[in-house]
Image (tube, helix red, strand yellow):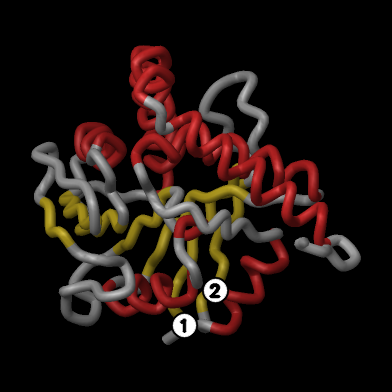
């Protein structure tokens, strides 16, 4: 018979709940039911993220979008700012922008090949965001991150539920590696990345409950 120590039962139930939810969202009935709404919502989100990013970018800038997925965010940016953008992703491919299939932990580009690296909702899908950030800061001096953060256990649980429902059907890695703002800052400091700007006001729709953050970082010389 399985026994649980202090807090063990809560952790077990927590993991069990997320596993059950993941099975539900990967069921074909669920996918057929929500796919029209998911596609429309995703397109709205991608356009809103591009709108949020555009103020940080310069025209004709050479940019790498790490974990570009379907390429919609990068494509929207290309139209908005006339930037030169390349996408990489380990799982998906896109015809919307120039694309290379690769992992963020091993970027196949020379030092400072790009002027800016984008990490859009990528790092919480990694086991250790430092591995990707090291590579990102090697190929470009400037890094722009869009991710989520949490301030409470309840906020973290809601992020996990939302991530399972929206990313689970696409079989993306789900380590649920969410960080508090101070944890983000410690990582940046350890990698000698200076915070140029930190914006916590972004919402991709009016009633979006998730806490989002944009970081603009620069590699120390």
Position of residue 122 measured from the top left corner of the image (x, y, whole percent): 42, 54
> Residue 92 versus residue 45: which sits nearer the camera?
92
Total labels: the figure holds: 2
Badge 2 marks a residue whose secondary structure is: strand
> Residue 152 versus residue 87: which sits nearer the camera?
152
Position of residue 159 measured from the top left corner of the image (x, y, whole percent): 63, 42
Q: Is residue 31 above or below residue 220?
A: above
Task: Kindly identify the residue that appears in the image at 57 percent across and 67 percent down.
Answer: 195
Badge 1 marks a residue whose secondary structure is: loop
Mark 1 near mark 2, Cβ–Cβ under 8 Å? yes
Q: Which residue is mark 2?
A: 194
Q: Which residue is mark 1?
A: 220
Q: Earlier in the sequence, mark 1 or mark 2?
A: 2
Position of residue 216 measured from the top left corner of the image (x, y, whole percent): 49, 59
Q: Residue furthest right?
A: 6
Q: Residue furthest bottom?
A: 221
Q: Residue furthest front?
A: 1
Position of residue 178 measured from the top left corner of the image (x, y, whole percent): 61, 56
Q: How far apart are the alpha carbons under marks 1 and 2?
A: 7 Å
Task: Kindly identify the residue that appears in the image at 82 percent across and 64 percent down.
Answer: 3
Tell me the tag on residue 124.
none
Q: Is residue 123 above or below residue 214?
A: below
Q: Quadrant of residue 201?
A: top right
Residue 112 placement, left or right of 8: left
The C terminus, quarter of image: bottom left
Question: Badge 1: how crowded within 10 Å, few (<14), some, or many (20+)?
Answer: few
The N terminus, quarter of image: bottom right
């Amino acid at each position: 018979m399985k026994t649980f120590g202090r807090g063990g039962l809560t952790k077990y139930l927590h993991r069990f709940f997320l596993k059950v939810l993941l099975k539900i969202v990967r069921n074909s009935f669920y996918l057929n039911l929500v796919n029209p709404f998911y596609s429309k919502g995703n397109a709205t989100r991608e356009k809103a993220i591009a709108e949020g990013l555009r103020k940080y970018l310069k025209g004709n800038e050479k940019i790498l979008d790490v974990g570009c997925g379907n390429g919609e965010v990068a494509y929207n940016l290309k139209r908005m700012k006339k930037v030169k953008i390349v996408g990489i992703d380990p799982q998906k491919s896109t015809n919307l922008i120039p694309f290379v299939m690769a992992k963020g932990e091993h970027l196949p580009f020379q030092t400072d090949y790009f002027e800016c690296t984008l990490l859009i909702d990528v790092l919480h899908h990694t086991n250790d965001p430092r591995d990707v950030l090291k590579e990102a800061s090697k190929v470009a001096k400037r890094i722009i991150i869009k991710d989520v953060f949490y301030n409470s256990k309840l906020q973290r649980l809601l992020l996990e539920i939302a991530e399972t429902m929206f990313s689970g059907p696409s079989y993306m890695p789900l380590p649920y590696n969410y960080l508090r703002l101070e944890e983000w800052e410690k990582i940046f400091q350890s990698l000698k990345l200076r915070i140029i700007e930190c914006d916590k006001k972004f919402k991709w729709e009016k009633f979006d409950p998730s806490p989002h953050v944009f970081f603009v970082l620069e590699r120390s010389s």
